[in-house]
Image: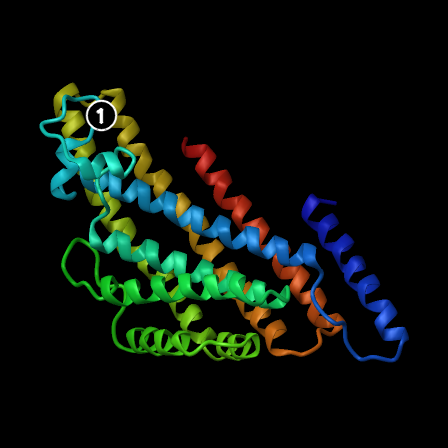
Amino acid sequence: MSWYAKALDVLKRVALLACTGVLLAGISGCMGIPDQELTNYREAYIEAQKAGDLLYDDLAAAVVRAGGGPAASNCVRNNNTPTCFDPSVALNGGAPADIPAIRARRLALSAIETYNLAVVDVLEGKRGDALATRIDNLKGLVGDLLLLGSVTTGPLPALVAGNSAQLLGALVKRLDRFASQQQVRASLVDNAETVETLITLLIRDTKPMYNLYRTSQGKYAVELELSGGSRNKAALAAYARIASYHDQLTAYVQLLAQTRSSFAQLIESLNNSQVSTSDLRATIREAIEIRKAAENFWAEVRKAR
């Protein structure tokens, strides 16, 4: 039996035991999701954001190498002598700032993660300043995404337009009116469609992402090939990274799809005053599945590094 099957079997037993006392007392459902499962969800959503950020890092680097990055790209310290110095590069950890299109996609990932963490906060019973801070962060991310996500210039299409822009605009207005924990709970349930839409947009966006990476990385590989011949090891490695990026995107799409499925289950739990045994089992299964998808992604990353 694999670790995955063993984990699923053990956690199903945990779910059953967690509810047994409640059921024997004549109550139809459990009071809530175990803390460990909520912790698993929190960690999984953070991993999903890390995965996306890594792919956007690689995409941004490929764009810069192909000469399509921001003006400060020439000021980066790499194997060559920089032709300039830009303090914004120093403040950004030695890398040029993202082009708006990539920055918008990072914002979308952060908004998805923060929304999910807000759902977990409510399920954990958090309130007051801790919950208010999370909602304020979410409001800032969604507002910035609404502005940057609609940018149509650059090598990638606008991420936010039409219905998705309307959903984000409505969410910003709702976030301004959040007050009590009960209002937060109701609003997070009511606006769940916005997050599901964002995840779907990011999944669809992997197609232009790959096209841009293939074009930019391919241009860089050709330059290396011309400078060192067809057997140039650096050129061969540059070409190989294109196939590797394709594999990582495949695992990333599967991770995003699982994130969407797990989010739907989490919202179902948020919408119910009590969590039934079947709901708890489904929640635990989703937590395991999202962990499995994250591990598959990082396995692809390790192959490429």
Residue in the image at 46% along x and 62% along y: 133
Residue in the image at 56% along x and 74% along y: 181
Question: Which residue has dot 1 on it?
Answer: 78
Residue nearest the viewer, comparing 42 with 69:
42
Look at the image and tell me whether residue 201 can be seen. no
Q: Looking at the picture, how far across and down is residue 145, in whole percent? A: 30, 63
Callout 1 crowding tier (Cα within 10 Å): few <14, some 14–19, many ≥20: few
Residue in the image at 13% along x and 22% along y: 227
Left or right position of 266 against 111: right
Look at the image and tell me whether residue 267 can be seen. yes
Q: Amino acid at mark 1?
A: Asn
Using the image, determine if residue 218 lies above or below residue 197. above
Using the image, determine if residue 119 lies above or below residue 13. below
Q: Residue 275 occupies which quadrant of the picture?
A: bottom right
Q: Secondary structure at mark 1?
A: loop
**Quarter that holds the N terminus:** top right
Q: Residue furthest left?
A: 83
Residue nearest the viewer, comparing 121 with 145:
121
Left or right position of 52 against 30: left
